[in-house]
Each structure stands twice: as C-alpha cells, then as structure tokens.
Image (cartoon, grey):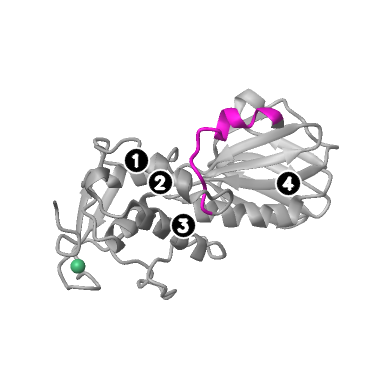
Amino acid sequence: MPEGDTVYVAAGRLHRALAGSVLTKTDFRVPAIATADLSGRKLDEVVSRGKHFLFRIEGGVTFHTHFRMDGEWHLYRADSRWRGPAHAIRAVLETESWTAVGFHLAMTELVETAAEDRLVGHLGPDPLTDWDHGEAVRRLRLHPDRSVGETLLDQTVMAGPGNVYKCEICFLRGADPWTPVRDVPDHDGLVDLTARLMGANRKTGMQITTGDQRPGRQRWVYGRAAQPCRRCGTLVRRKAQDPSGERVTYWCPTCQPAR
Ligand SMILES: [Zn+2]
C-alpha cells in the first residue's frame, strides 16, 4: 500500500509535468463526476497532503484523489501507448505535452479549492509538507490507552505513515506495537523518528528505513516474517493488528519486548 512518501514523490512528478499548462482534455471515469469537463483551464499545481492528492485547477476547482491500496499515476507522451488495464482507469488529464492516467484511484471527486479542508482538514501534520512537531506530539497523546501501532496509522495524528512505517518505527523505538501510547517512552523521539524516516525517503518514496537501498535489505522487520532479526537473530513475527486482519504487524519479540 502506498504511503505518504510514495504519494509525495508521485505528486511532485505530476506537478513538474503538468503544472502551469492548460488542460486540453479531462476524462473522469467515476459516476459522480463523469460529466465534468475541465478542459481549457490551467492546472495550477499538484500537491500532496498525507496520502491525498490535490490537483488545483484554474477557477478555484480542486480535483482530489487517493491511492488507497493500489492506486498509480502514469505519465505518457502524447502518442505513446498506455500500460495498465483500461477498466481500472479513473481519471485522464491531458496537456499539450503530457497525459496523466490514474489507475485504481479512490475518493475521486471535484471540490471548490476553498473547501479543501473538508477533505484534508482532519489530517495531522505531514512530515513532507506541513510539519509541526509539537502538534504531532499533542495529537499522539490524545488517546493514551490506544496501542502505538494503531496510533501511528491514524492520519489525524500524523499524515503519511502507513503500515510499513508503523512496523519499522516500532522496531527502531524498541516498542512492542500493542503497547499503549502512554507506556511508550519518549514521545518526542517517536514523532521525530517518523519525520526523519519519511524525510529521508522524500526522493525515493520507497520507505527505506535501514539506509540500505539494495533489494531485500531496505527494512528491519516489515515483510520479513520468520527471518532472523537483523539486530539479534530472533525470528521476526507477524500478526494482524486490527480485527479486519488487513494491517499485518511485523515485529521482533526480543528487540520489542511486551510491557
Ligand atoms: Zn531483534
């Protein structure tokens, strides 16, 4: 699942390709906005907030979307062939030089730019766009009985971290992911680590937490169930953190002892 750094990198690429150009064609393939036509308007900018994309378009319109589980944006030159399944296309934005094609997008809608807060106003500080360390610490402490793992996924605390960062941050802080926030020492350090790890990936968008870019060495615990911990050799464990079983947690029971 794409995390905040992935979205930040994708928004940057889209901005460099499209911003400042007039849209020559728009094609929204979701029922609620299928009839909208924004051609003839300039695309002013593409920005990210957490895992959300905001395309700000001339005339005070914002096209909002989200990658959710498997969204992608592709950029094509005018006459090149599109890859990816046609049935998964949710939006096409064309300028004279580029065509941006969005696959598997979620939460796709058009809103007044002045009303963007309705979509992203609930988000906590984003380490890559509007970071505020003190505010992130304050929000972290709002639910002291909740597990640190769940809290790191709460986008109203910090916008951007997903399941990879959650697992890696808990490992690097020596915290069992089920520990209540109030029992995790050094909230400042936890928040600061989140911002530094995401900041380090602002160019790659690849959630590299070990500092090693080589395939198979990029992470401490995420995706490494039953493999030896890189620090202590204990086998990394894997378990669903929430009832849906969607968010799988990886952790080292030795480096991250239960309290
Ligand atoms: Zn370990």
- Mark 4 residue type: Glu
Mark 3 or mark 2: name the one nearer the start of the chain: 2
Q: Which quadrant does ligand 1 occupy?
A: bottom left
Question: Contact (CB < 8 A) between labels 1 and 2?
Answer: yes
Q: CA distance from mark 3 to mark 2?
A: 12 Å
- Mark 3 vs mark 4: give the one in front: 3
What is the magenta range? 114-127
Quadrant of residue 89 within the rendered picture: top right
Q: CA distance from mark 4 to mark 2?
A: 30 Å
Give me the disc on residue 195. Answer: 3
Q: CA distance from mark 3 to mark 1?
A: 17 Å
The residue singled out by tag 1 in the image is: 141
Tell me if mark 1 has few (under 14), some (14-19) or many (20+) residues whose alpha carbon lies within 10 angstroms of its own: some
Quadrant of residue 251 within the rendered picture: bottom left
- Mark 1 residue type: Arg
Q: Residue at x 61, y 25 (%)?
A: 31
Mark 1 or mark 4: name the one nearer the start of the chain: 4
Residue 228 relative to residue 72: left or right = left
- Mark 3 residue type: Ala
Residue 163 relative to residue 12: left or right = left
- Mark 3 vs mark 1: give the one in front: 1
User: Is residue 143 or residue 256 the one in the foreground?
Assistant: 143
Q: CA distance from mark 1 to mark 4?
A: 34 Å
Residue 119 relative to residue 124: left or right = right
Give me the disc on residue 137. Answer: 2
Q: Find out whether residue 108 is within the magenta segment.
A: no
The residue singled out by tag 4 in the image is: 45
